[in-house]
Amino acid sequence: MRLLLVEDDHKIAGYVKRGLEEEGYAVDAAYDGRDGLDWALAAPYDLFILDVMLPGLDGFSLCRELRRQGIHAPVLMLTARDAVDDRVDGLDAGADDYLVKPFAFRELLARLRALLRRAADAPKRTVLQAGDLTLDTRTQRVQRGERTIELTAKEFAVLECMMRDPGRVLSRTVIADHVWSYDAYNQSNVIDVYIRNLRRKIDDDSERKLIETVRGVGYRVTVDDAATA
């Protein structure tokens, strides 16, 4: 999942960004409303976290502009103000939820998970399957047959991206857009390294190979019983 955080307090932004990245999210950060809008229009995001009191363009105005531009990803507003009118203004601007500072990071995570669940295409599955490989997005559990596979957060995110569309070849760029923030994905072999790790954990001990390379194009999780690549 790729998120955009727009927060002018660099200390708060750094704290939230690091925490979310440790949870496996890809996070880009902007520090004023105008830059936030530029980022939002330049790349696809699954969710936006917007501070209300932003220089250049306040959070309410930024949220309204996102909706005007046809961007429908969930928006969580952050603010130090707890007045009912402020919350109403945020919701009227097109925000989906509202979190008052100071907040517990666990609550932020819970709000994000709830927003992402609601935004998911119903009936979007939480358990994905390809052959005897299953991935549960709620429990973060991956199994190959009866064998539980331990993955890092980023390995899990790469695998989930591929298993959301089994059989389809995904380019390195498509995978990176769903898993990494813009500033983190700066080496062409990053995806190759994660695919190699996934193959080692998922395919090495199995006769049937599920992760396939399509030379010159990208990678896919195959659903062809005959595939052994």
Image (tube, helix red, strand yellow):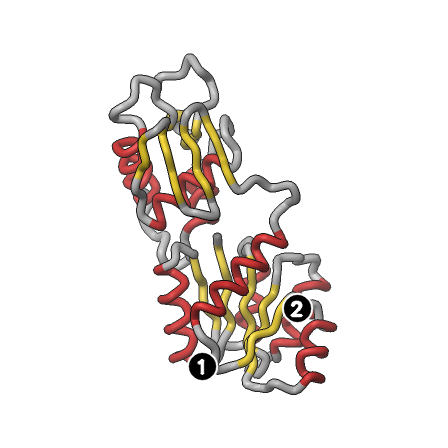
Q: Give the residue at x 51% y 37%.
A: 164
| Image x and y of residue 181, in percent | 42, 57
Mark before the other along the chain sequence, 1 or 2 = 1
| Image x and y of residue 152, in percent | 31, 48
Question: What whole-number distance in Å separates the C-alpha atoms at marks 1 and 2?
Answer: 20 Å
CA neighbours of label 1 inside 10 A, class few (<14), some (14 to 19), many (20+): few
* Quarter of the C terminus within the rendering: top left
State the SS at label 1.
loop
Report whether 14 appears left or right of 115.
Answer: left
Say above or below: 107 vs 82. Answer: above
Q: Give the residue at x 60% y 73%.
A: 98
Report whether 103 appears left or right of 185.
Answer: right
User: Contact, CB < 8 Å: mark 1 with mark 2?
Assistant: no
Q: In which quarter of the image is residue 116?
A: bottom right
**Count of residue discs:** 2
Report whether 115 appears left or right of 16.
Answer: right
Q: Which residue lies furthest to the front in this view?
A: 146
Residue 214: image tag: none
Say above or below: 72 vs 60. Answer: above
Q: Give the residue at x 39% y 42%.
A: 141
Amino acid at dot 1: Asp
Q: Mark 1 points at which residue?
A: 9
Q: Which of 153 and 127 is in front in this view?
A: 127
Q: Nearer the viewer, residue 138 or 99?
A: 138
Report whether 122 appears left or right of 11.
Answer: right
Q: Which of 56 and 223 is in front in this view?
A: 223
| Image x and y of residue 54, in percent | 56, 81
Q: Which of 19 and 7 is in front in this view?
A: 19
State the SS at label 2.
loop
Q: Name the residue under label 2.
A: 95
Amino acid at dot 2: Ala
